[in-house]
Image (cartoon, grey):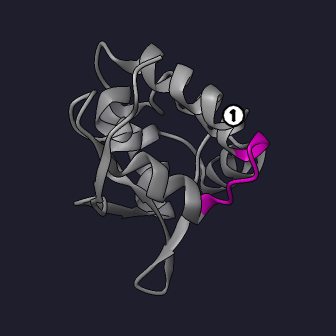
Amino acid sequence: MAETSHSTTDAPTTWLPLPDVAERLGLSILKVHQLIKDGALLAVRHEGVRQVPAELVANDIVLKHLPGVLTLLRDAGFNDDEAVRWLYTADDTLPGTPAAALGGDKAREVKRRAQAVAF
């Protein structure tokens, strides 16, 4: 098994408050809260307001593999702040961060690594 090389934690570059997430997704704010409650999306306090990293709702949809990755991380005991930290920790073997890789052809690899964290 290849050793995972985690170097630095990068913060998301752009954050969206929940009303902006609702607008981007074309959903009501209640539905966004439901997505968060159901574990399909995560929101953390950033600058005193619950917000979502913008790249997790790229192209007007929640990234396809995000709910599965969040479920695996929560099963491993991660809270939303810890999940954001994991998603934004640079990994030289991806390369980049798991969050960035979720939007590309490495999404299944990110999911596999999240599953490994749970064990």
Picture quarter containing residue 67?
top right
On the image, the x and y values in percent for residue 111 come to 53, 23
Residue assigned mark 1: 72
Picture quarter containing residue 104?
top left
Mark 1: amino acid = Leu
Picture quarter containing residue 114?
top right
Q: Residue at x 60, y 56 (%)?
A: 29
57 relative to 29, above or below: above
Question: Helix or strand or loop: what does disc 1 sit on?
Answer: helix
Nearer to me, 112 or 63: 112
In the image, is 17 to the left or to the right of 101? right
Q: Residue at x 43, y 46 (%)?
A: 87
Nearer to me, 103 or 111: 111
Magenta region: which residues?
A: 74-80
6 relative to 69, above or below: below
On the image, the x and y values in percent for residue 27 come to 55, 42
Q: Residue at x 55, y 20 (%)?
A: 112
On the image, the x and y values in percent for residue 91 come to 30, 40
Q: Residue at x 47, y 39 (%)?
A: 26
Asked if residue 47 is among those painted magenta in the image, a careful observer would answer: no
On the image, the x and y values in percent for residue 85 come to 46, 58
In the image, is 60 to the left or to the right of 51? left
